[in-house]
Amino acid sequence: MIQDLKEEYGNIFEEELINEIVQVGTFKEVPEGYKFMEIGDYIRGMPLLISGVIKILREDEDGDELLLYYLEKGDTCSMTMACCMGDKKSEIRAIAETDAKLIMVPIQKMEEWTGKYKSWRNFVFNSYHVRLNELLSTLDNIAFQKMDERLIGYLKEKARVTKDNIIHSTHQDIAYDLHSSRVVISRLLKKLEEMGKIKLHRNYLELLDL
Amino acid sequence: MIQDLKEEYGNIFEEELINEIVQVGTFKEVPEGYKFMEIGDYIRGMPLLISGVIKILREDEDGDELLLYYLEKGDTCSMTMACCMGDKKSEIRAIAETDAKLIMVPIQKMEEWTGKYKSWRNFVFNSYHVRLNELLSTLDNIAFQKMDERLIGYLKEKARVTKDNIIHSTHQDIAYDLHSSRVVISRLLKKLEEMGKIKLHRNYLELLDL
DNA sequence: ATACCTCTGTAACCAATGTTACTGCGAAGG
DNA sequence: CCTTCGCAGTAACATTGGTTACAGAGGTAT
């Protein structure tokens, strides 16, 4: 755990802070598909992601989903922080997109450290900042783009975070993330294949030239 | 200026911080329609809103607009903060929705104070938190609601922040904020009128029973 | 092999939203 | 008083995306 932590966070946190994290944090290793958090859950702690990818989803009352963004190594979840401070329930769902390693830090420490460590304060501010912009760009996509563009963006982003040009998803999976329907996604994917941008298979698809 | 500041922020900031703000901040009084900030502008300072309402808009490359949220008294703009920290350009446009009074604080002070004053730190964190949730709810509206629901929500919110059941907007104005078209908005407004929820006039409309 | 189940392809249809075009009204200014 | 201009009403139409329905392909379990 200390090795992993130092490797990923050693250059941004002071030695002393790293030691505190090691003392109070709990190391977790979770498999793909693991559900960290459900909407309405109370927040237990704050995650520091060491490896892997976590996807953050929003859901409305009817159970319709929407992918907000991915967390990658070095990231933490601002939503979590936002919730902690208000002592509120989670507004989002978090699911491991790949196998992942992370450290959970108790929420009380979070506030204590913001007064004590400048590096921690900057880390937290920076996370907010990054997430805010991420959300903004998600909003842009939904507000200003059509489904075909959103689909292409989705495939690219997914390939980027998983570092794999093969997307291991069914059409239905994609439809959920984009808050669309399977038939629509199949239709658009077919068009992309005809344009030579992708190659379709059962249960996965290859990106060729997006 | 000191009066206004103390009235609005006196109970959340220490005396000492208030004094600092008075020393380095510049008081501004602006009329309705004043444009604080354009997309791509460099950020000069951070606004502390004392009275009035400011609307925050997002715009894409084609000039299509979208209302993100309103700032009210006691609010500050997290977007600004997010931009300051990264020394970036503005991602948004800010326009006075009503006459407004505010204090501009130089951005260097912002970081200094986060280390020095707990109340300031909490204020900044809280702003981030509030804006993040505001953005999230804007996203919900766009992703999960139909235009008629969004329109109703828009009218209600606008009446709330301006404390006025008369909305002084043309159909075209509303269409811009919702990123729709004038004809669509006219159509939906007409339906709302037929349902007895609003009363239409030239250049303004009354909310009756939303 | 057979039965079953999931995933994909496709067609027909519908609803919501956006677009274009034209009309008339009312306010403002000459 | 008349003209002009911006705003609102409305119809006809196009496009996008969502829904329903069904067929076939491929994999899995018995």
Image (spheres, coloured by chain):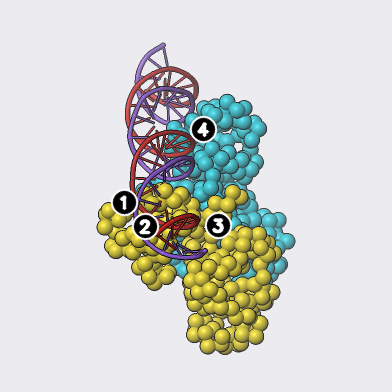
Chain colours: A yellow, B cyan, C red, D purple
Q: Chain of mark 1?
A: A
Mark 1 lies on residue: A191
Task: Determine contact: label 4, label 1, CB under 8 Å.
Answer: no
State how far apart marks 3 and 4 are (Cα): 28 Å
* Mark before the other along the chain sequence, 2 or 1: 2
Residue in the image at 57% along x and 30% along y:
B192
In the image, which is nearer the foreground, mark 1 or mark 3? 1
| Residue B19: % across, % down | 66, 66
Mark 3 lies on residue: A58
Which element is circle 3 on?
A: strand
Mark 2 lies on residue: A152
State how far apart marks 4 and 1 are (Cα): 34 Å
Residue in the image at 56% along x and 69% along y:
A34
Residue type marked 1: Lys
Mark 4 lies on residue: B188
Which element is circle 1 on?
A: helix
